[in-house]
Image: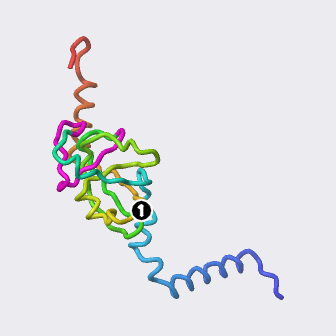
Amino acid sequence: MPVLNKSSQFNCALLTVALVFTVAPAAFSEETTEAVSQTADFAGKAAFYSSDLHGKKTASGQAYDEGKLTAAHKHLPFGTKVTVVNRKNGKTCTLTINDRGPYTPNHVIDVSKAAAKELGLMSDNKRIVDCFIKIDAKDLLRKQQQKVKVASQPEGETL
């Protein structure tokens, strides 16, 4: 068996990588790479609201509407947009946080009935989801402008 020097080993490694990408290009598509490179902001078990709560006030003051794409989270500000992905089937939808919860142990988000249907969670017992917080460019710009106003405000004045 011949002994390989470092440059020969490197060339063999390059050839192996080239073969893998040639033989299995679908496994390394841009879509796959993009999905793998995005990590969820939070993930775990999801639940959905009971129909008994339809019309009742949420923590934000809005009435719960089981036909709207809304959700509850313990800490995210009201109005935050969150894209939720069902790990089991890949279905996604973007929800607006308008309530507090979930209060069930080991759950990360409660979703409306419409969202549960769209995500395919109604008959799924595990309901494991990945959640991505959406940042609206307008909101980001507004927050930066508010920081500038506060920083440039004369001393002694209040907001």
User: Residue at the front extreme?
Assistant: 52
> Taking 90 as reference, is 60 above or below it?
above
In magenta segment, residue 59: yes
Kindly identify the amino acid type of the residue bearing the numbered disc 1.
Answer: Asn
Tell me residue 105's x, y (percent). 45, 45
Which quadrant of the view contains residue 46? Answer: bottom left
Tell me residue 153's x, y (percent). 23, 21
The residue located at (27%, 51%) in the rendering is: 50
Tell me residue 22's x, y (percent). 51, 86
| Residue 12 or residue 24, whichever sits in front | 24
Magenta span? 58-75
Which quadrant of the view contains residue 89? Answer: bottom left
> Taking 155 as reference, is 100 above or below it?
below
The residue located at (19%, 48%) in the rendering is: 54
| 10 Å crowding of disc 1: few (<14), some (14-19), many (20+) | few
Quadrant including the C terminus: top left
Q: Main secondary structure of the magenta part?
A: loop
Q: Is residue 4 left or right of residue 113?
A: right
Which quadrant of the view contains residue 4? Answer: bottom right
Instruction: State how the image is colored.
Output: rainbow
User: Which residue, given by chain and number where applicable, does mark 1 sit on?
Assistant: 125
Number of callouts: 1
The residue located at (25%, 40%) in the rendering is: 78
Quadrant including the N terminus: bottom right
User: Residue at the top extreme?
Assistant: 156
> Taking 113 as reference, is 2 above or below it?
below
In magenta segment, residue 125: no
The residue located at (38%, 65%) in the rendering is: 124
Tell me residue 155's x, y (percent). 26, 14
Q: Secondary structure at mark 1?
A: loop
Q: Is residue 4 left or right of residue 21?
A: right
